[in-house]
Amino acid sequence: QVQLTESGGGLVQPGGSLRLSCAASGSIFSIKDTGWYRQAPGKQRDLVALITGDGDTKYVDSVKGRFTISRDDAKNTVYLQMNNLKPEDTAVYCCKVAGITHALTGFSSWGQGMQVTVSS
């Protein structure tokens, strides 16, 4: 069983920065695709950024140039650096990690979600 622990959310003023972390623990052999998602009130959950097992990254247009997704394989941790935050970035952010366990079975796990509020 793979568990995800998220941290780094909170309240920030417009133009500020936050760094979200998503640490995976358990019987992990390798991590494949990892994504950060967000859900604003009354809206659906959307993918914000993705990093593949090969290290390729993809971003939704609204965060390009402001957000950076990265991964530390030694720590099984994925980060989302968010700069120049805007009020419209306010949402609950959660990570999703997919990979392979030591039993050579696939897994896909979601974090618990954390609030990011951008407001003056």
Image (spheres, grey):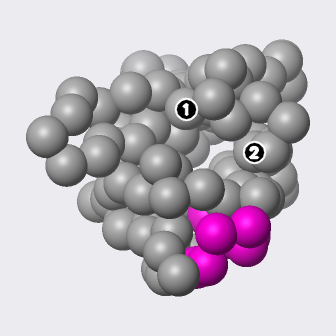
Q: Nearer the viewer, residue 79 or 11?
A: 11
Q: Residue at x 73, y 73 (%)?
A: 16
- The x and y percentages for residue 120 are 53, 81
- The x and y percentages for residue 64 are 77, 30
The numbered disc on residue 48 is 1
Asked which secondary structure carries label 1, the reply is: strand
The numbered disc on residue 67 is 2
Looking at the image, residue 31 lies above or below residue 67:
above
Q: Are marks 1 and 2 in contact (CB under 8 Å)?
A: yes
Q: Residue at x 47, y 26 (%)?
A: 47
- The x and y percentages for residue 9 are 50, 73
Q: Quadrant of residue 79?
A: bottom right
The three-letter amino acid code for the residue at tag 2 is: Phe
The three-letter amino acid code for the residue at tag 1 is: Val
Q: Is residue 95 left or right of residue 45?
A: right
The alpha-carbon separation of the residues under discs 1 and 2 comes to 9 Å
- Crowding around mark 2 (Cα neighbors within 10 Å: few <14, some 14 to 19, many 20+) is many
Q: How many marks?
A: 2
Asked which secondary structure carries label 2, the reply is: strand
- The x and y percentages for residue 33 are 61, 23
